[in-house]
Amino acid sequence: MSADTMERVFGALADPTRLDMVTRLAGGDATVNQLAEPYRMSLQAVYKHLRVLEEVGLVSRPPGPQPRVVRLETEVFDRMEAWIERYRRRAEERYSRLDAVLAEMNAETDDDSNTTTEREDPS
Protein backbone atom coordinates (compact mmCIF):
# COMPACT_ATOMS: atom_id res chain seq x y z
CA MET A 1 0.00 0.00 0.00
CA SER A 2 1.49 3.35 -0.99
CA ALA A 3 2.21 6.06 1.55
CA ASP A 4 -0.41 8.29 -0.10
CA THR A 5 -3.06 5.58 0.21
CA MET A 6 -2.13 4.96 3.85
CA GLU A 7 -2.36 8.69 4.55
CA ARG A 8 -5.85 8.76 3.06
CA VAL A 9 -6.97 5.67 5.01
CA PHE A 10 -5.64 6.98 8.32
CA GLY A 11 -7.08 10.39 7.49
CA ALA A 12 -10.50 8.84 6.96
CA LEU A 13 -10.24 6.99 10.27
CA ALA A 14 -9.07 10.14 12.09
CA ASP A 15 -12.62 11.48 12.11
CA PRO A 16 -14.42 10.18 15.24
CA THR A 17 -17.73 9.62 13.42
CA ARG A 18 -16.12 7.60 10.62
CA LEU A 19 -14.04 5.61 13.12
CA ASP A 20 -17.22 4.84 15.06
CA MET A 21 -18.98 3.74 11.87
CA VAL A 22 -16.11 1.38 11.05
CA THR A 23 -16.16 0.05 14.60
CA ARG A 24 -19.88 -0.60 14.38
CA LEU A 25 -19.54 -2.27 10.97
CA ALA A 26 -16.94 -4.62 12.44
CA GLY A 27 -19.88 -6.20 14.24
CA GLY A 28 -21.79 -6.75 11.01
CA ASP A 29 -23.25 -5.11 7.93
CA ALA A 30 -25.78 -2.31 8.39
CA THR A 31 -27.99 -0.08 6.31
CA VAL A 32 -27.27 3.63 6.07
CA ASN A 33 -30.29 4.35 8.27
CA GLN A 34 -28.99 1.93 10.92
CA LEU A 35 -25.58 3.60 10.80
CA ALA A 36 -27.18 7.05 11.05
CA GLU A 37 -29.26 6.26 14.16
CA PRO A 38 -26.86 7.34 16.92
CA TYR A 39 -25.71 10.56 15.25
CA ARG A 40 -27.27 13.97 15.48
CA MET A 41 -26.70 14.81 11.83
CA SER A 42 -28.60 14.72 8.60
CA LEU A 43 -28.72 11.61 6.46
CA GLN A 44 -26.87 13.63 3.82
CA ALA A 45 -23.97 14.16 6.29
CA VAL A 46 -23.89 10.41 7.00
CA TYR A 47 -23.66 9.74 3.26
CA LYS A 48 -20.73 12.16 3.04
CA HIS A 49 -18.90 10.23 5.77
CA LEU A 50 -19.65 6.95 4.01
CA ARG A 51 -18.39 8.37 0.71
CA VAL A 52 -15.03 9.15 2.33
CA LEU A 53 -14.83 5.61 3.73
CA GLU A 54 -15.80 4.17 0.33
CA GLU A 55 -13.20 6.26 -1.52
CA VAL A 56 -10.37 4.76 0.55
CA GLY A 57 -11.83 1.25 0.28
CA LEU A 58 -12.82 0.74 3.91
CA VAL A 59 -16.50 0.14 3.16
CA SER A 60 -18.62 -0.76 0.17
CA ARG A 61 -22.27 -0.49 -0.78
CA PRO A 62 -23.36 -2.84 -3.53
CA PRO A 63 -25.35 -1.23 -6.31
CA GLY A 64 -29.07 -1.70 -6.24
CA PRO A 65 -32.25 -0.34 -4.76
CA GLN A 66 -32.45 1.22 -1.33
CA PRO A 67 -31.92 0.21 1.42
CA ARG A 68 -28.43 -0.90 0.53
CA VAL A 69 -26.24 -2.63 3.05
CA VAL A 70 -22.91 -1.05 4.01
CA ARG A 71 -20.16 -3.63 4.32
CA LEU A 72 -16.73 -3.36 5.91
CA GLU A 73 -13.94 -4.33 3.48
CA THR A 74 -11.35 -6.31 5.41
CA GLU A 75 -8.75 -6.34 2.62
CA VAL A 76 -7.81 -2.75 3.43
CA PHE A 77 -7.18 -3.75 7.03
CA ASP A 78 -4.96 -6.61 5.86
CA ARG A 79 -2.88 -4.13 3.83
CA MET A 80 -2.79 -1.71 6.76
CA GLU A 81 -1.64 -4.51 9.04
CA ALA A 82 1.16 -5.45 6.63
CA TRP A 83 2.25 -1.80 6.42
CA ILE A 84 2.22 -1.41 10.20
CA GLU A 85 4.01 -4.74 10.69
CA ARG A 86 6.86 -3.65 8.43
CA TYR A 87 7.50 -0.55 10.58
CA ARG A 88 6.98 -2.48 13.82
CA ARG A 89 9.72 -4.94 12.76
CA ARG A 90 12.06 -2.05 11.93
CA ALA A 91 11.45 -0.52 15.34
CA GLU A 92 12.01 -3.86 17.08
CA GLU A 93 15.30 -4.30 15.21
CA ARG A 94 16.45 -0.85 16.37
CA TYR A 95 15.47 -1.64 19.95
CA SER A 96 17.28 -4.99 19.78
CA ARG A 97 20.46 -3.25 18.60
CA LEU A 98 20.09 -0.69 21.39
CA ASP A 99 19.59 -3.49 23.95
CA ALA A 100 22.78 -5.16 22.70
CA VAL A 101 24.76 -1.91 22.99
CA LEU A 102 23.41 -1.26 26.49
CA ALA A 103 24.17 -4.83 27.57
CA GLU A 104 27.72 -4.46 26.28
CA MET A 105 28.12 -1.14 28.11
CA ASN A 106 26.79 -2.73 31.32
CA ALA A 107 29.18 -5.66 30.94
CA GLU A 108 32.12 -3.25 30.49
CA THR A 109 31.02 -1.27 33.55
CA ASP A 110 30.75 -4.48 35.58
CA ASP A 111 34.24 -5.55 34.41
CA ASP A 112 35.67 -2.14 35.38
CA SER A 113 34.02 -2.34 38.81
CA ASN A 114 35.44 -5.82 39.43
CA THR A 115 38.95 -4.77 38.36
CA THR A 116 38.86 -1.71 40.64
CA THR A 117 37.62 -3.78 43.58
CA GLU A 118 40.38 -6.35 43.06
CA ARG A 119 43.09 -3.62 43.00
CA GLU A 120 41.73 -1.96 46.17
CA ASP A 121 41.45 -5.20 48.13
CA PRO A 122 44.84 -5.60 49.94
CA SER A 123 44.27 -9.24 51.00
Image: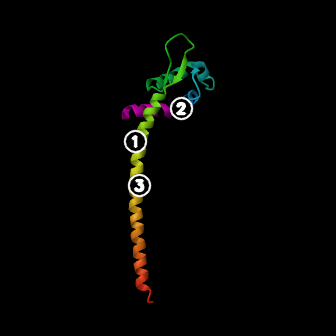
Q: Provide the residue designation for mark 1.
A: 86
Q: Nearer the viewer, residue 101 or 5?
A: 101
**For this view, does 70 lie left or right of residue 3?**
right
Q: Tell me the kind of residue under disc 2.
A: Leu
Mark closer to the chain start, 1 or 2: 2
Q: Residue at x 50, y 18 (%)?
A: 61
Q: Tell me the kind of residue under disc 1.
A: Arg
Provide residue 53's location: percent of width, then percent of height: 48, 26
Q: CA distance from mark 1 to mark 2?
A: 23 Å
Provide residue 17's location: percent of width, then percent of height: 55, 30
Q: Is residue 3 magenta?
A: yes
Provide residue 122's location: percent of width, then percent of height: 44, 89
**Neighbour tally class for label 2: few under 14, some 14-19, many 20 plus, Cα within 10 Å:** some
Q: Tell me the kind of residue under disc 3.
A: Ser
Q: Is residue 9 magenta?
A: yes
Q: Main secondary structure of the magenta part?
A: helix
**Compared with residue 42, is residue 96 higher up or lower down, i.e. above or below?**
below
Instruction: Point out the image quarter for the C terminus.
Output: bottom left
Q: Provide the residue designation for mark 2.
A: 19
Q: Provide the residue designation for mark 3.
A: 96
Q: CA distance from mark 3 to mark 2?
A: 34 Å
Instruction: Point out the image quarter for the N terminus.
Output: top left
